[in-house]
Image: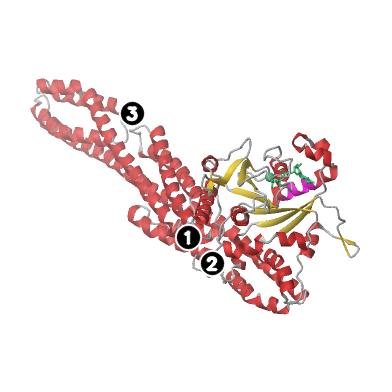
Amino acid sequence: MATVKMPEPICLIGNDENGCMCVMREALDILEQITQPVVVVAIVGLYRTGKSFLMNRLGRKKGFALGATIESKTKGIWMWCLPHPTKEGHTLVLLDTEGLGDVDKGDEKHDTWIFCLAVLLSSTLVYNSMGTIDNDALQKLHYVTELTEHIKVKSGLRDDDDQSTEFMSFFPSFVWAVRDFTLKLELEGRPITADQYLENALKLKPGSSIKSEKYNLPRRCLREFFSPRKCFVFERPASKEKMSKMEQLTDVDLESSFLKEVEEFCSYIFTNAQAKTMRDGLGLIGRMLGTLAETYVEAINSGRVPCLDNAVESLSQIQNKRAVTEALEFYRSEMSRNVQLPTETQEDLSEIHTDIQREAIEIFINGSFNDVSQRYQIDLMRTLQSVYEEYCRDNVETSRTKSKSVISRVFSSLETELRKGSYMRPGGYTDYHNTLKRATEQYRSEKGHGLMREEVLKEYLSEKEGTGQSILAADKSLTESQQEIERERLKSEAREQQQRALEEQNRIKDQQIKDQQRAYDENIKQMLEKFKRQEEIAKQEHERVLNAKLKEQRDLLEQGFKDRAEKMQGEIDNLEEKKKNWSWSSIAGTALDTIGTAAMIFLPGAGKIAGFGLSMLSKLFK
Ligand SMILES: Nc1nc2c(ncn2[C@@H]2O[C@H](COP(=O)(O)OP(=O)(O)OP(=O)(O)O)[C@@H](O)[C@H]2O)c(=O)[nH]1
Ligand SMILES: [Mg+2]
């Protein structure tokens, strides 16, 4: 699985000449190369608040451009892909966004979409602000209150349908980064953590006046949509004078307390930021993120509200088709590179095929996304099988041709003598028989004529049976009883050759049946393992949402919002119910049946199909 290490960030989403948002080709090309799962960390917040500077700390060097003036610097969404520093096999994608609230720009709508895209594309969202988390800071975060109008989970939902549980399941985790924090982390004289500071700032005001509704709205949205929530406070990094030439500063110029806070922040992100998933634990690899960005931007440009389910649908169509094509291309090119026909035995071909097939299935499994009813996997299995069968046929044909040419060479002097009639004389039979035997031995001792050697030999020798009989009958040096013995010998030699050829054919057939069984087993194994990984993520996500909702309900009760707490019960019951009836093993079982039924048709050899699949299933989903 491939990652990339970009030397510097580039623009992912910008504006085209008509002022419409567009996903940049160059960025898509980079994402295309990433076949690893992605951990996507996006930063959003008001303009000129040190967002790019903080993101560069995560990138471990200067990357995103900083601005020293009051003019806003970052435009659109910028992307920086790096090998994840701690999660092996993962790519870290940093997204730096255009600052919000620039009055000169004065395009609120654009700001809202930047915020929504950051939410939709990331797995961890960092909200960056200056000073303190007070009511003013929260009112500036009004973008969260607009999410319900700008993002849909299912396409059929009405605007007033409650989507908060769904939002929480697929929204990123939330980190509030408070910059230039000068207060003491204390509450009622007791020290508190930054997280407690945030949670305290998110407490709701009792009452239902317009004023308290306004006060509560952004708080409620944060509490209902985002979990887990985390807060980090940072001191000012350096003096005002130094800050103006920030680009030239190194760590020695920065306050040690700032550096320590930054380290804690980075270590939290590196350890806790999860790989990006859609719903039900469907993970994204880099190139899917590119398609996802395109899908959302396209919806926004055409005046639609980005919708999670639609995005899943279009991702699965694009990615699954591609995964099949890539797996097949890999199989075809590796087979043609590694196989030289004819192979000595069927096993030789089968061994190469099995290894390459395993990798091809891996390519498919890694690149596929939400392959409903295993449609694409079955398609791949069928095509792989037919390409392999073609190889088997070619192998037989080339071996035939090769064997025939060896036959005509090693038996050539015998043929010449036969044409001349040299063996039709007393003592001729013994000469004939000996020459035939020597040529047969030579044929067998040579290599390279492939898996049909005995079959082709059998065909040749059986053509010669009549000739042998005639020479024997014409050989007057042999007595009647000697002739009888020789006739018997010829018969038994023919039987022996037939047996050899039959065994050879049986070995070929048996191996082909074994190959079908192995193809089936390998597909099932990899499919079920993917299901298992997906199930684990989906379970964790479900648990996370359920716990967050339970905590929210407790908090509401403690803070005297009995009505609201009771209202949540329905949602919680649904979540509990789903947890109780968690049935991935039955989903996996259905998938197993689907593949099994399809495979029976085109893999007639895989007769004991259920055995392996079911034992895998019970092993994985206990
Ligand atoms: N006071 C203060 N200034 C900072 C901090 N971090 C960066 N700066 C300075 O703020 C200015 C803007 O920094 P950027 O990182 O470009 O800020 P930004 O939020 O990305 O700005 P836009 O892209 O324009 O929205 C630079 O001059 C930085 O030196 C900080 O923690 N505190
Ligand atoms: Mg910036």
Q: Is residue 173 left or right of residue 36?
A: right
**What amino acid does circle 3 point to?**
Gly
Q: Is residue 195 left or right of residue 463?
A: right
Identify the disc placed on residue 148. Answer: none
**Quadrant of the rendered image holding ligand 2:** top right
Horizontal and vertical percent for residue 510?
35, 46
The segment highlighted magenta reads 261-268
Query: Is residue 177 shown in magenta?
Result: no
Please tell me whether mark 3 or mark 1 is closer to you in this view.
1
Residue situated in front as seen by the camera: 155 or 452: 155
Label 1 SS: helix
Task: Point out the residue furthest to the front here.
Answer: 104
Residue beneath disc 3: 448
CB atoms at circles 3 and 2 under 8 Å apart?
Answer: no
Horizontal and vertical percent for residue 455?
25, 37
Kindly indicate the quadrant of the structure image that contains residue 373.
Answer: bottom left
**What amino acid does circle 2 point to?**
Ser
Q: Residues within 10 Å of mark 1 (few under 14, many from 20)?
A: some
Residue beneath disc 1: 614
Q: Residues within 10 Å of mark 2 (few under 14, many from 20)?
A: few
Residue beneath disc 2: 583
Query: Is residue 262 shown in magenta?
Result: yes
Please tell me whether mark 2 or mark 1 is closer to you in this view.
2
